[in-house]
Image (tube, helix red, strand yellow):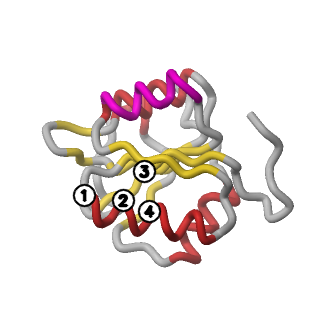
């Protein structure tokens, strides 16, 4: 991992989002914050391949993906001790599997200020 930038933002962010328009919006917003590298994946399998190739400093995971969810990605990130937040349109009351409970969550739509704050805080992984 590269050191953080002076604003406290990660240098490499992975966005896992299956809606291309939402993914592009997140990507543009995060790049606009000055993050050096922003990558997107529309599926859990693609995200896992990107993580294997080059682990990110932080990840933003949509809970519900077409044909599944992002829980396998979350498990991999936890194993690698890479911080992440879930983002969901289901609301904050969404039930997560026990190993992922306590993971920070943003609701869609979120403001750019909420998103920037999440990147700055870079919450630690939920305990296994």
Of 97 and 88, nearer the camera is 88
Label 2 Cα crowd, 10 Å radius (few <14 / some 14-19 / many 20+): some
Is the residue under label 1 in contact with that under label 2 (CB below 8 Å)? Answer: yes
The residue that mark 3 highlights is 86
User: Is 25 on the left or on the right of 30, as rendered?
Assistant: left
Do the residues under discs 3 and 4 have CB atoms within 8 angstroms? yes
Query: Quick one: which residue is furthest to the right in this view?
Result: 6
Q: Residue at x 39, y 57 (%)?
A: 87
Label 1 crowd bin: few (<14), some (14–19), many (20+), radius 10 Å: some
Of helix, strand and loop, which one carries label 2?
A: helix
Mark-to-mark CA distance, 3 and 1: 15 Å
> Decide: marks 2, 4 in contact (CB < 8 A)?
no
Q: Earlier in the sequence, mark 3 or mark 1?
A: 1
At a point 55% along the width and 72% down the height, the residue shown is 114
Query: Dot 4 corresponds to which residue?
Result: 106
Q: Is 123 above or below relative to 2?
A: below
Question: In the rendered structure, which disc, 3 or 2, sits on the residue that comes first in sequence?
Answer: 2
Mark with earlier residue (2, 4): 2
Residue 7 quadrant: bottom right
The span shown in magenta is 45-54
Residue 34, position in %: x, y? 69, 65
Q: CA distance from mark 3 to mark 2?
A: 14 Å
Question: What residue is disc 2 on?
Answer: 23
Q: Position of residue 82 (x, y in %)?
A: 61, 34
Q: Nearer the viewer, mark 1 or mark 4?
A: 1
């Amino acid at each position: 991992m590269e050191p953080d930038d002076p604003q406290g933002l990660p240098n490499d962010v992975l966005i896992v989002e299956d809606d291309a328009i939402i993914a592009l919006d997140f990507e543009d917003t995060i790049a606009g914050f000055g993050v050096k590298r922003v990558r997107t994946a529309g599926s859990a399998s693609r995200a896992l391949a990107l993580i294997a190739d080059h682990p990110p400093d932080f990840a933003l995971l949509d809970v519900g993906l077409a044909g599944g969810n992002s829980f396998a990605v979350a498990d991999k990130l936890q194993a690698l001790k890479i911080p992440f937040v879930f983002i969901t349109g289901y609301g904050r009351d969404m039930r997560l599997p026990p190993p992922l409970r306590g993971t920070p969550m943003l609701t869609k739509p979120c403001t750019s200020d909420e998103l920037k704050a999440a990147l700055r805080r870079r919450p630690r992984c939920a305990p296994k």
